[in-house]
Amino acid sequence: MDFWFRCCVCSAQTPFGLRETKCACGGTLLVEYDLERAARDMTKAALRARPASMWRYAELLPVSNPEFIVSLGEGWTPLLRLDAAERALPLGKLWVKREEQNPTGSFKARGMSVALSVAREHGVRKVAVNSNGNAASALAAYAARAGMEAYAFLPKDCPWMIAEECVHYGARTTLVDGFIHDAGKIILDGKAEQGWHHVGTLREPGRAEGKKTMGLELAEQLGWKLPDVIVYPTGGGSGIIGMWSAFRQLRELGWIDGKLPRIVAVQETGCAPIVRAMSGRSGPEAAVDSTPTGMRVPNPPDGQLLVRILRETGGTAVEVSADDIRSAQTVMGKLGVSSSPEGAATWAGLAVLLDRGWIGPDEEVVLFNTSHAMKYWPKDGRSLPEVRSYEDWKKIQP
Amino acid sequence: MDFWFRCCVCSAQTPFGLRETKCACGGTLLVEYDLERAARDMTKAALRARPASMWRYAELLPVSNPEFIVSLGEGWTPLLRLDAAERALPLGKLWVKREEQNPTGSFKARGMSVALSVAREHGVRKVAVNSNGNAASALAAYAARAGMEAYAFLPKDCPWMIAEECVHYGARTTLVDGFIHDAGKIILDGKAEQGWHHVGTLREPGRAEGKKTMGLELAEQLGWKLPDVIVYPTGGGSGIIGMWSAFRQLRELGWIDGKLPRIVAVQETGCAPIVRAMSGRSGPEAAVDSTPTGMRVPNPPDGQLLVRILRETGGTAVEVSADDIRSAQTVMGKLGVSSSPEGAATWAGLAVLLDRGWIGPDEEVVLFNTSHAMKYWPKDGRSLPEVRSYEDWKKIQP
């Protein structure tokens, strides 16, 4: 095997495994690769000729035999320059990584593509996930593709359209009276009896590795130069862990140098454990009252590692209100971008940090738009005017 | 200028223009290019190094100055092999072009990217479209990106989520008591007074040219070899016209040879004017009673050209019922694909043609999945089971 685990706390190395995620010392296990060997085939030149897929980085993903790869066309999403916005703010350069253009309309496709490839290589037949939405629909799609049975457990107030999506892909979909960790408890309680492979955040190694490709793509799409700041909506935080792994591996390969981007975790007021932890407060939220988005994760599986990464990169964590998020969705829509609440939260977070002077006007910033706006729309949409003719239409103009 | 119009009926050549689409003889004007000049820079080798965007084919798109390009990250969508399905049917090779992975979640992004680039190059400030949905939301997004005012007119029974999407991107959105052509009449009646540039199907040259990139990509993604059959959901049919232009240009460039793919237009029973025309019946539908999808276009702007293309390629037109489409959506969902009714209609059409023996078991077929499943979901979704614990969950298992 060209990959193995290394504990991010005590640095102990252990063999790669399907279900391991924690070291004996309690630290999270991250996947390490034989980078010298990886770089033999995966040169920068070779990459330029590879398909527009996150599997272009196969040498840095924990699947031994490519026949087991479960792919639906994920990754290599556009990195769109928001030039009008960067002039207005102002900001040196502003990009948005359009993760909603993944197969299931969200960034979760990346993690599930790798998690289910690993699972398939290890002979898994039944997969289960607890999720605020998009991870569940991605699991459902990739399980369908892999011919596995999928079980999705979602908080009952999750976006209804994403729950429908799970059903579209044939997953056994159940709503749970509680939060994402309550949904996770059902899997923990049932997995021995049901034979479920648990693909919840940091319950297996594939998802964080899949998210790593966001960091690899960002580097390649920017010509192997990283931006000053990455603003990322944060729930469980596997995307931050994955991107940090990506940057460290790229540095070890000698493909990037200098400082890593300052990573900013954005959360919503009412459930911001990473923001609390960054300011030295720990322990569970007194009362969770944020909206049901992917950022609502009261007990992230490894909050300590997230804090360490944010500190190590010189980053920060910032909370924004539900109202700020709604306004930011309007702004992003008027830039032509279909932005989920989580994606819009990055815009709101950027505004806060520009305001504080934490981000300077000459800096280069990347926002992650993790999902489509429409996946979150309530059933009680606005009522639109209805006409029969141009004359009718003229009458209703202001 | 390196591009101009040629009438598809009388072959007369005229200068390219923003609003022309019909020759004096009544034929549709198609854009022609100086292919020799295009091939100087756009070699096959050069293409391999270009970005994963439909604008990689800029030499074959009618924008003179690249500064006017209005892009949101469209095109170069994945071509996914459905290997499990091709073994089961059986079929030589089966692919699905995942057009739902475009920026606005549909293939309409391609046409609007080009239409608004052309419009921007010509100084347009206000754009209007009549649409069954996805063309309107794409117009809205690209107009937002271009800083233009957008006016969208949609049949009142169009998918509510797509109407919402238009609003998300800031378009002035109006529902019309009627069909797509009734919505179009409002634009025709108002455009002089309002100064609207009409970007309805075949009202300007950009949209069909944008759709052309689907054909160019298909050829490049398959290594400059085309499939035997393309199955395409058809409303106004600009995608068929565009892909046919693509293949003819590629043949003239000497990049492909042999027969063109047989193009199959799929429509829904209750509004299938192309199916009627192919069997020699013409005139308007007696009564339109199909579901409100992009295929519901009772009077396609140039049905004659569509019939000619289908005949010339040895293709056909086939109608499928709303029930067939619903079943096909379930099938595609269980293959892991988020398929709109239009995309699923291609699966249903494929089944009909395999059944008839019109498509043989050794052939290579490409389906076009034009949009995401979720954009069409009704507000009265199914009710999912709700539990508090694993024990609860076990009780409700069958």
Image (cartoon, coloured by chain):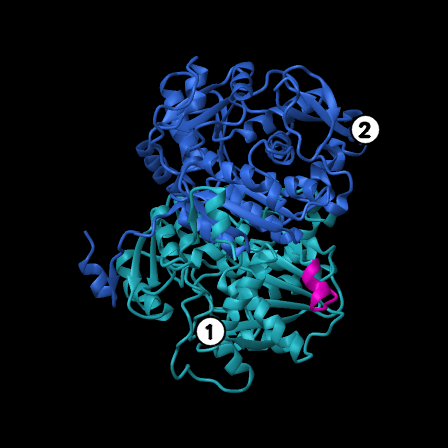
Chain colours: A cyan, B blue
Residue B183 against residue B393 in the figure, above or below: above
Label placed on residue A307: none
On the rendered structure, is A391 left or right of B50?
A: left
Which residue is under mark 2?
A: B37
Q: What residue is drawn where x is 41% and y is 19%?
A: B276
On the rendered structure, is B163 left or right of A38?
A: left
- Residue A31 lies in what quarter of the image? bottom right
On the rendered structure, is B115 left or right of A376?
A: right
Camera-side residue of B263 and A116:
B263
Which residue is under mark 1?
A: A24
Q: Between marks 1 and 2, how big is the CA–CA gap?
A: 65 Å
Kindly state the secondary structure of the residue where label 2 is placed. Answer: helix
Q: Is residue A86 magenta?
A: yes
Three-letter code for the amino acid on which mark 2 is drawn? Arg
- Residue B193 lies in what quarter of the image? top right
- Span shown in magenta: A83-94
Q: What residue is drawn where x is 45% and y is 61%?
A: A204
